[in-house]
Image (spheres, grey):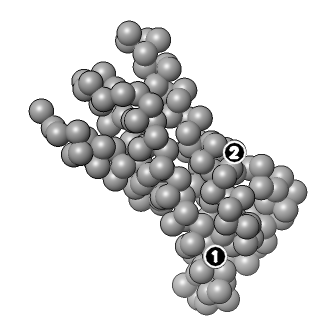
Amino acid sequence: MLTEAASYGGLFVAAFGAATILPFQSELIFVGLQLGSNLPIWALVLVASIGNTLGSVVNYALGAGLEHFRHRRWFPLTEVQLERAQRWYAKWGIWSLLLSWAPLGDGFTVVAGIMRTPLWLFVLLVAIAKTGRYIILAWLTAATLG
């Protein structure tokens, strides 16, 4: 059996990676620990939420640094795509960060960095979204599998 520290560490790494543009998944590890360990649910939610929120801060930093290179040939977005994303963000604003838990939500966190959303507000909204996701996942797991 894994030690508590290894369990929490693995969950943190998975949640952190899942929030970045890397192809990680944290839900299976979260549910596995919820069902297969004696770790308190609140602690699993806390560790996963912190890891996932900090992973989103990496996306924010990428976005903040990325715009500097927008006129380079290798830049991953065309000028039209970048302007469309900025217009969308300007229209829907920071509240779109409450969808950062969704599959395409990582893009919102990158755009927030490009748009220079105040970091404290970014972290607050993303933390609410990410924590809400893990609370719902824990509740659904408990309700479904007991």
Q: Residue at left 17%, top 39%?
A: 3
Give the quadrant of residue 128. top right
The amino acid type of the residue labelled 2 equals Leu
Look at the numbered disc 1 and give the secondary structure of its residue: helix
Circles 1 and 2: CB atoms closer than 8 Å: no
Name above or below for residue 116 compared with residue 16.
below
Left-right relation of 87 to 110:
right
Give the quadrant of residue 73. bottom right
Name above or below for residue 12 compared with residue 111.
above
Tag 1 residue: 64
Q: Residue furthest bottom?
A: 72
For the residues labelled 1 and 2, the Cα–Cα distance comes to 19 Å
x and y, in percent, of residue 84 in the image: 78, 65
Left-right relation of 78 to 52:
right
Name above or below for residue 120 compared with residue 142.
below
> 85 or 60: nearer the eye?
60
x and y, in percent, of residue 102 in the image: 59, 42
> 110 or 84: nearer the eye?
110
Q: Residue at left 32%, top 37%?
A: 29
Q: Residue furthest left?
A: 1
Look at the numbered disc 2 and give the secondary structure of its residue: helix
Q: Residue at left 53%, top 29%?
A: 135
Task: Answer whether residue 82 is visible to the viewer in this image.
Answer: no
The amino acid type of the residue labelled 1 equals Ala
x and y, in percent, of residue 111 in the image: 68, 65
The numbered dot on residue 98 is: 2
Left-right relation of 21 to 132:
left
x and y, in percent, of residue 47 in the image: 41, 44
